[in-house]
Image (cartoon, helix red, strand yellow):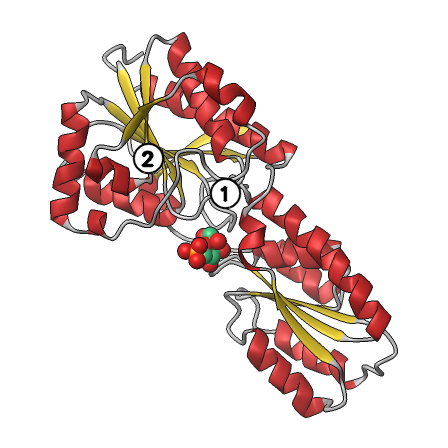
Amino acid sequence: MNQSIKHIGVFTSGGDSPGMNAALYAIAKTAEVNAIKVSGIRKGYEGLIDNDLVLLKSIELQKLTQKGGTILKTARSKRFMELDGRKKALQTLKANNIDALIAIGGDGTFKGLLTFSEICDIPFMGIPGTIDNDLSGTDYTLGFDSAVNTAISNLDKIRDTAESHNRVFIVEVMGRDSGYIAIHSGLTVGADAILIPESSKDFIYLLDKIKNYDSEDAFLIVVSEGDEIGADLVASNIKKINPHVDLRITRLGHVQRGGNPSAFDRMLGIRLGVASVNALLKGKNNMMTGVLYNQVHLTPFQEVVKQHQVNDELISLLELFGI
Ligand code: F6P
């Protein structure tokens, strides 16, 4: 046990994701049990630069696990990319006697910590917080399950109107460069086509299918925002092949980031929050906690930032279901 840790700083960074507040609760609780003080750093790296800290107490966080977003607020900090910004962040840590740091965020957050470790020698721990599910070292990132559930409830609604009008709907879902949200939401709502960045054949399947579309039913296409073709070009190609189709494009956008976290994400936040404090106490550094095969697992940041892509087993489902 590393008994020298007396004060942990924690922040959320990058895109918010449902489950972040549950992780903060678990961090505060585990730290209290070990007589460690926890300061929340507001607005991610921005708060680290600006010395914007707030004391975190588990009793105050206990009832916030159901809240979406992050109570600490978040940001994508440009200033931290500059050495000057990182030096100011170091001063904040020193001025507050913070001797360990936990960051909840995505690959940009962990790349930031790796760079920061060049000038800062306190231990860093990470928790995967992004709806994109695009990090290696964990089967699931915080917020992914909630985002998929939000996407499917919206896709179900779109199906109602699409069926009423016999329309083709192209629905764009988030995921940055990853097709996880698209494949999970598209398959589970019975979409007719799913386009993801990890597959080059998906567009060919779609074009084949749309040739025979007789406008007697709805036709639902889920497109990941990172797909190489993209919603607009898909629409114009469909129109070229079949000019009479009645077609609409819907972008679900940031609605997928908000809302109450699912039970899965709350539990994941709690498990990873506890695991991150325990890992610091065991002397671990520059690692992300994740869950692999339902076991808590630690992965070095260098490995984490390599993209976690939709695997072949999932891609093969597109072929099997003909979508
Ligand atoms: O990384 C999470 C995410 O929601 C991506 O899916 C999306 O591409 C991006 O963030 C949007 O970022 P912003 O909120 O800065 O527009």
Q: Nearer the viewer, residue 198 or 52?
A: 52
Residue 59 is left or right of residue 173, and the answer is left
Discs 2, 1 touching: Cβ within 8 Å: no
Compared with residue 221, is residue 82 higher up or lower down, i.e. above or below?
above
- Label 2 crowding class (10 Å Cα cut-off): few <14, some 14-19, many 20+? many
The quadrant the N terminus occupies is top left
Compared with residue 125, is residue 191 higher up or lower down, i.e. above or below?
below
Q: Is residue 282 visible?
A: no
Q: Secondary structure at mark 2?
A: loop
- Residue at image position (81%, 71%) is 218
- Label 1 crowding class (10 Å Cα cut-off): few <14, some 14-19, many 20+? many
What residue did someone put label 2 on?
42
Q: Position of residue 70 (x, y in %)?
A: 45, 37
Compared with residue 214, is residue 133 higher up or lower down, i.e. above or below?
above
Q: Is residue 2 visible?
A: yes
Dot placed on the residue nearer the N-terminal end, 2 or 1: 1
Whether label 1 lies within 8 Å of ligand 1 gets the answer: yes
Q: Label for residue 17?
A: 1
Q: Quadrant of residue 110?
A: top left
Q: Secondary structure at mark 1?
A: loop
- Residue at image position (16%, 51%) is 82
Quadrant observed for ligand 1 in the rendered image: bottom left
The amino acid on which the numbered mark 2 sits, given as a three-letter code, is: Arg
Compared with residue 170, is residue 122 higher up or lower down, i.e. above or below?
above
- Residue at image position (42%, 22%) is 27
